[in-house]
């Protein structure tokens, strides 16, 4: 065994499954372990990374539940949770990675991680953009917005686009992509601050605070008197029901997530599904990882747009791994403004 | 005005809108009017037809409601209802039709109809097959099964296909098309007689009586231990909810109709829509009339299969226009076995 010093390794550990209800900070705890900054002998094709930025994502809520048959496994109580992040390679015996490489992808919520399946990582080539962007705009959220909008919604110039959770990590990008294509775009979010951002920062044509609309159907009819061609679904529940009443013929609904439902014991009912028949609506669930082969194409599109100032991105930055549980839980009550991430270390 | 004798013209008239609940025979009445068997002078491009066979179709239920914004207009109380049928031209001043032509398409529920928009008609070319088939197998129901299955479901050999209302006008064909393609096909229906037909006449791999299954999820898991690739949705409600729990990754749901819902005042809720995300399900509503340009292609496929005995079709034939209200209402309680049609005249 190599004679390397142990370093402290703080971890965010799930204490118990949270099957229903809003997760609390006390459902997680910070534990201090120690780790050797070297891939252990006998472990093949592994890398040891220093985690820099962690990404808080809605899908993580479901990993806190005890699920039998999920497309991502449940977190393991007593172990550090995992998620997307940006990290730096500090040791490697994997032929494709060397010390100092920057990567984004699936890592542990801890200061250092030993990654034995680096197939889930992307090497970061463009380091002239903020590294934090690889938790969002240039990472999973960006790819979600890109593939959900372009691949699932098959948008056309001039179409009427509605985005819920529109100031979030994905929504803010869907709206901007739709504007770049020449669509009419309306977003909804849950605070005045977010609505201002949508209109003034991201260039949505209109935006409204869903919490101030007692009748969502009426709100949608106000903003879409001719109906909705494309709905980018992030929330589910009552919002989806109102949207179904307002779709245009041959409309498309990309179902990216249903964050309003993740804390419910039983999912809220949808009543208006029947409308997809007369309106010939295509409604499609998708998972971004099915589309990662398009990542180079996405970067080719989005990096020039970022550099030309045509795409902007708002991040909500929590400092220190100790703040990670609070930051994650904030997603489910809409506390974050923009992409929620956690700084573990800056380099 | 031409000096032609008037003939009697019995009509099926809707008395009042039926907005909720099961329609009753007394919501319709047979009225006897009279008609001249000639296109009136001053009416351009019209045809006068003798109606032979009328088609009873589930979508007609919605036309009995007072709807503001429907893809087909509501019936008009006090007037004869309309629907698909097979008819013979008895007079025409339309350049494309001449006396004796046989047509199928939208006509009145009456003995004779003056049709001023024969664009909604198809001329019948293949008269060596039973004319009644043009109310179903070779008409709208056939095209619905064909386009719903091939165009919307994009099926592949070996896939697991589930059809609800499987012995109906559309379902029996979807199952047979799927078997011809080499799929595993299970159907559900509401009586022992229908289940026997599915298995012994239409060649479904399995079939079950949904009325005898207290737990539809368990029933589907029994017949689809590996899950469902394609669901051809005819019924909605609880069945859809159970199906959503059993879809395979990248599954497709063609939403053709939701007959279980048409008599409800408020549509029944769907609870399991969220599953379309992890399973990446595409769910698509469709209307057959969007696909009528494919009719010649359909005939090319289906006519040889019928002649070779590879496709069979069961019809439930009601005799006489007086029986039309009862026949139509029978659809909504599942009284019909196979395609429900009404004989007005045999030639």
Image (spheres, coloured by chain):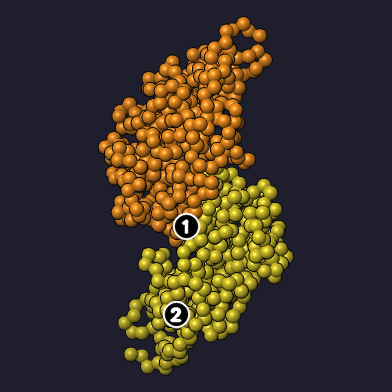
Chain colours: A yellow, B orange
> Which quadrant would the C terminus of chain A be assigned to in this image?
bottom right
Relative to the observer, which residue lies in front, A82 or B102?
Answer: B102
Asked where in the image residue A37 lies, by quadrant, the reply is bottom left
Visible in this render: residue B94? yes
Q: Is residue B281 left or right of residue B180?
A: right
Q: Is residue A116 above or below residue B330?
A: below
Asked where in the image residue A306 lies, by quadrant, the reply is bottom right
What residue is shown with label 2? A14
Q: Is residue A305 left or right of residue A283?
A: right
Task: Kindly state the secondary structure of the residue where label 2 is placed.
Answer: strand
What residue is shown with label 1? B271
Q: Is residue B12 left or right of residue A179?
A: left
Where is residue A188 shown, x and y percent of the image? 64, 62
Q: Is residue B282 above or below residue B13?
A: below
Residue lying at 61% horizontally and 74% vertically, measured from the top left: A335
Q: Is residue A29 above or below residue B130?
A: below
Asked where in the image residue B166 lies, by quadrant, the reply is top left
Q: Chain of mark 1?
A: B
């Amino acid at each position: 065994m190599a004679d390397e010093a142990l370093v402290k390794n703080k971890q965010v550990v799930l204490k118990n499954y949270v099957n229903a209800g809003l997760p609390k900070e006390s459902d997680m705890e910070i534990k201090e372990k120690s780790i050797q900054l070297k891939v252990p002998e006998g472990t093949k094709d592994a890398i040891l990374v220093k985690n820099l930025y962690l990404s808080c994502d809605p899908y993580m809520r479901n990993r806190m539940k005890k699920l039998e048959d999920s497309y991502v496994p449940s977190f393991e109580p007593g172990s550090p949770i995992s998620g997307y992040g940006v990290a730096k390679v500090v040791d490697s015996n994997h032929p494709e990675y060397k010390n100092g490489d920057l990567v984004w992808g699936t890592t542990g919520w801890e200061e250092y991680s030993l990654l034995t399946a680096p197939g889930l990582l992307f090497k970061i080539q463009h380091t002239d953009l903020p590294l934090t962007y690889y938790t969002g705009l240039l990472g999973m959220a960006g790819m979600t917005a890109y593939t959900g909008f372009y691949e699932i919604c098959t948008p056309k110039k001039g179409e009427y686009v509605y985005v819920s959770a529109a100031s979030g990590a994905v929504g803010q990008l869907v709206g901007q992509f739709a504007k770049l294509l020449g669509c009419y775009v309306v977003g909804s979010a849950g605070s005045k601050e977010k609505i201002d951002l949508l209109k003034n920062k991201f260039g949505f044509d209109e935006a409204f605070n869903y919490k101030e609309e007692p009748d969502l159907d009426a709100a949608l009819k106000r903003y879409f008197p001719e109906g909705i061609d494309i709905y980018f679904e992030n929330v589910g529940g009552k919002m989806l029901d109102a949207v179904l009443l307002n779709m245009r013929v041959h409309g498309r609904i990309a179902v990216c997530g249903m964050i309003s439902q993740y804390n419910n014991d039983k999912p809220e009912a949808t009543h208006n599904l029947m409308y997809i028949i007369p309106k010939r609506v295509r409604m499609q669930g998708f998972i971004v990882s099915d589309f990662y082969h398009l990542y180079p194409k996405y970067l080719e599109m989005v990096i020039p747009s970022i550099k030309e100032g045509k795409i902007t991105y708002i991040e909500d930055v929590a400092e220190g791994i100790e703040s990670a549980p609070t930051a994650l839980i904030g997603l489910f009550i809409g506390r974050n403004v923009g992409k929620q991430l956690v700084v573990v270390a800056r380099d």
